[in-house]
Image: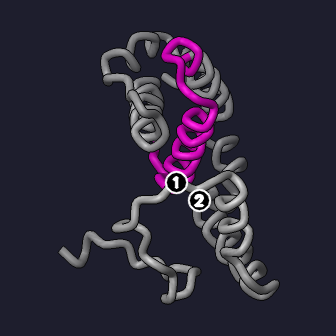
Amino acid sequence: MDSLLCDEVWLSSPETPDYHNQPRWYSHEETYAAASSFYTTIEDCEKTVSIYLEKEFTCMPEPGYVEHLRTKNLLFARFRAIQWLIKSRQRLSLSFETVFNAANYLDRFMSMNQCHGWKCWMVELLCVACLSVASKFTETRTPCLHDIQVITVTLITVGLS
């Protein structure tokens, strides 16, 4: 069971009181004051920003990703995939965050997996998977795979066989 638990280090102090057993309504001013006092020193704020920047770098595509797309003739396929994600957002009433995350997952997967000979159906399947995973993280009502797949036909027609 321990392997399923998150290993992140919390940035708050261990003296944080436990409010789970004490039901209480908070005013807007109290909530704002609690949020603004979470980081008590400038050093805490700087440390937090540096941690988040490090995490952001781990979520970026591999270095040389654009060149990888050029050499594998995947630029147009990626363009069409992003276009399909945007159309799916409107059709399925998804948030922009979901589309952004799906595009990020698509880029990261394509940069890490050096597939020899991408096919049209591979990029279509990858788009469906990325949108499905992204919607599960950000949407309160996730569309089923059948609804996501409806418009994947003729997603990428040029550049791949």
The residue carrying pointer 1 sits among few (fewer than 14), some (14 to 19) or many (20 or more) residues within 10 Å by Cα, namely few
* Marker disc for residue 25: 1
Residue type highlighted by circle 1: Trp
Q: Nearer the viewer, residue 38 or 96?
A: 38
Q: Residue at x 44, y 44 (%)?
A: 137
Q: Nearer the viewer, mark 1 or mark 2?
A: 1
- Range of the magenta residues? 88-116
Residue type highlighted by circle 2: Cys
Q: Residue at x 46, y 24 (%)?
A: 120
Q: Position of residue 15 (x, y in %)?
A: 50, 88
Tag 2's secondary structure?
A: loop
The residue carrying pointer 2 sits among few (fewer than 14), some (14 to 19) or many (20 or more) residues within 10 Å by Cα, namely few
In the picture of the structure, the residue carrying the numbered disc 2 is: 59
Tag 1's secondary structure?
A: loop
Residue 113 vs 2, above or below: the answer is above
Secondary structure, magenta segment, majority class: helix
Q: Nearer the viewer, residue 152 or 23?
A: 23
Q: Position of residue 47 (x, y in %)?
A: 71, 83
The residues bearing labels 1 and 2 have C-alpha atoms spaced at a distance of 37 Å
Q: Residue furthest left?
A: 1
113 part of magenta stretch: yes
Residue 118 visible within the image? no
Residue 27 visible within the image? yes
Residue 36 vs 29, above or below: the answer is below
Name the colouring of the figure. Answer: one colour
